Each structure stands twice: as structure tokens, then as C-alpha cells.
Image (cartoon, grey):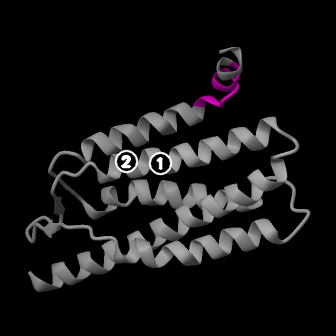
């Protein structure tokens, strides 16, 4: 119990705010909603920035963390593009109208949990740090790739739907 407590108290405060934000966004996504396109891009941008920011962290004694990041980003970018995002466009206001779904909450918690776990492992276990760095970069790359693909697909679909109206 003391070990878990130490992990929790040594986690930077901003991480808990980020978790609260992601949970809040996920819960909001469970209800049908109408929002401007820029608001629909907040969570993807957070995850893209988080994924890209991990490239420069930790020792860069080898090329493998960058290779892992790049390979994972390239592997998940198509998944992000192909993941369906049903929505309509209000042609008067230009806002998107989305049905409710639990997908965003589950996705946010899984990605956060993976990133948090790898960060904790790399912070506390020197022997597992090298592997955690490579796995962490792969998760970060996958996150950035998926959300970049997702953002591209959303913007293209939005543009197409706006033109139809």
C-alpha cells in the first residue's frame, strides 16, 4: 500500500488535472452533442502533443526509441483515419452534431493508463528503464499517429459534409 501511495503522491499535479479533463471529455462524449469543429479537436490535439512530446524525454543512447515511436505512429495512423466517427453538420452554424458513445471515454482512459504506467515504470526501476523507454515511445508514437489520422479523417469528413450542404 505504501508503494502505491508513493507513486500517487509523486505524480505531478498536472497529470491528475489531465486525467480529470480526459474523464470529463469522455463523459460528455457519452451524450449527443453539438459543438464547433475546433472544440472537437481539443482531445486529439492533447494526445498528439503528448505523443510528440515524449520523443525528446529520457536518455537517447540509441536510435531504438525513435524507431519504435516512428513505427508505431505509422502503424496506427491508418487506424485513426479508418475509425468511424459518425456525425452530421448543422449547415446554418457549421457545428458538428455527434451521437453519444462510450468509445471516447474508454479510449481516453486506455491511452492515459498506458502512458502513465510506462512513465511510472521508467521513473522507479532502473533495470526496466531502457525497455520502458522503448515501449513508452511506441505508445506515444501510436497515440500521436492514431490521433493524427483521426484528426485528418474528421477534418476531411467535415469539409465534405459542409460542401454537401
Q: Quadrant of the N terminus?
A: top right
- Residue 50, placed above or below residue 20: below
Residue 12 painted magenta: yes
Q: Horizontal placement of 10 versus 125: left or right? A: left
What number is the disc on residue 97? Answer: none
Q: Secondary structure at mark 1?
A: helix
Q: Are marks 2 and 1 in contact (CB under 8 Å)?
A: yes
List x then y, in percent, for residue 129.
82, 48
* Residue at 75% from the left image edge and 60% from the top image edge: 134
Classify 10 Å Cα crowding around label 2: few (below 14), some (14-19), many (20 and above).
Answer: some
For label 1, the residue is 110
Q: Secondary structure at mark 2?
A: helix
* Residue at 17% from the left image edge and 45% from the top image edge: 31
Q: Horizontal placement of 162 versus 117: left or right? A: left
- Residue 3, placed above or below residue 32: above
The residues bearing labels 2 and 1 have C-alpha atoms spaced at a distance of 6 Å
For label 2, the residue is 106
By secondary structure, the bulk of the magenta-drawn segment is best described as helix
Q: Nearer the viewer, residue 97 or 117?
A: 117
The residue segment tinted magenta is 6-13
Amino acid at each position: 500500500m505504501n508503494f502505491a501511495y508513493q507513486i500517487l503522491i509523486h505524480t505531478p499535479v498536472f497529470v491528475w488535472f489531465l486525467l480529470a479533463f480526459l474523464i470529463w471529455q469522455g463523459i460528455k462524449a457519452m451524450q449527443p452533442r453539438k459543438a464547433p469543429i475546433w472544440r472537437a479537436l481539443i482531445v486529439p490535439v492533447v494526445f498528439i502533443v503528448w505523443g510528440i512530446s515524449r520523443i525528446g524525454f529520457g536518455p537517447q543512447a540509441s536510435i531504438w526509441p525513435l524507431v519504435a515511436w516512428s513505427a508505431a505512429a505509422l502503424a496506427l495512423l491508418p487506424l485513426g483515419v479508418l475509425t468511424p466517427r459518425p456525425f452530421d453538420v448543422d449547415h446554418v452554424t457549421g457545428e458538428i452534431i455527434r451521437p453519444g458513445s462510450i468509445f471516447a471515454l474508454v479510449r481516453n482512459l486506455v491511452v492515459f493508463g498506458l502512458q502513465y504506467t510506462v512513465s511510472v515504470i521508467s521513473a522507479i526501476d532502473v533495470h526496466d528503464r531502457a525497455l520502458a523507454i522503448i515501449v513508452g515511445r511506441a505508445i506515444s508514437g501510436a497515440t500521436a499517429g492514431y490521433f493524427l489520422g483521426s484528426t485528418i479523417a474528421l477534418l476531411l469528413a467535415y469539409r465534405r459534409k459542409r460542401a454537401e450542404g
